[in-house]
Image (cartoon, helix red, strand yellow):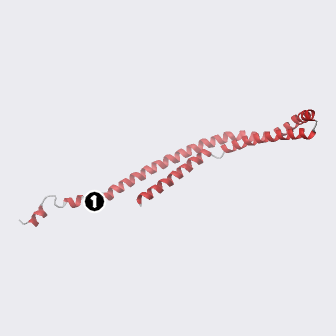
Amino acid sequence: MNTHERNENAPGAAQPQDAFSPSSHKPAANWEADVAQTLQLGEQLVGFVGGVVDLARVEALLAVRTLPKLMMLWLMMMPIILLTWCAFSALMAWSVVAASGQVGLGMLTFFLLQVLLLFVCRWLFVKYRTRMTFPYTRAQIDQFVRSTQDEFNRCSKTKE
């Protein structure tokens, strides 16, 4: 028996080539890892969408409950301005005129108090209106989009 026959018939002579060939197990392992990552990403996406829907539902409920307050405040702003004018105009004008003797200074004081009241009403109006824009839902979606973009950028850099 020559050496050529011994090498061909030796047990395991062809096994090292098959066992260590780059095409035997790596594509299947990569494919299984990709499928597992895709399934995990799908589960995370479903969880995220469910969370955003729940958050939007709760914020919609808050917005609906805030709507009557906003409407009442809006309806009360005009009567408040008129009642304030009627109730305090004579008092303010009289007290400033009595203290300083100048009618113009009394009217300026009255005007500045009305402006202050309007600023307070406007601040409350903006506060209630902001609640109706779903700020937490939008922030959650923006954060998800940013993290997804960062993840895709990181994955594309590692593949290069």
- Which residue is pictured at 50% across the width and 53% down the height? 148
Q: Is residue 75 left or right of residue 56?
A: right
Q: Is residue 55 left or right of residue 122?
A: left
SS at badge 1: loop
- Which residue is pictured at 53% across the width and 52% down the height? 146
Which corner quadrant holds the N terminus? Answer: bottom left
- Which residue is pictured at 65% across the width and 47% down the height? 133
Which quarter of the figure has residue 65? Answer: top right
Can the viewer see residue 78? no
- Above or below residue 121? Residue 13 is below
Viewer-proximal residue among 110 and 156: 110
Q: Is residue 99 left or right of residue 119?
A: right
Amino acid bearing label 1: Ser
Counting from the top left corner in percent of width and height, residue 8 is at 13, 64
- Count the marks: 1
Can the viewer see residue 58? yes
Mark 1, residue position: 24
> How would you rate the neighbour count of disc 1 (Cα within 10 Å): few for under 14, some for 14-19, many for 20 or more?
few
Which quarter of the figure has residue 98? Answer: top right
Q: Is residue 103 left or right of residue 29?
A: right
Counting from the top left corner in percent of width and height, residue 61 is at 63, 41
Which corner quadrant holds the C terminus? Answer: bottom left
Counting from the top left corner in percent of width and height, residue 116 is at 79, 40
- Which residue is pictured at 76% across the width and 39% down the height? 120
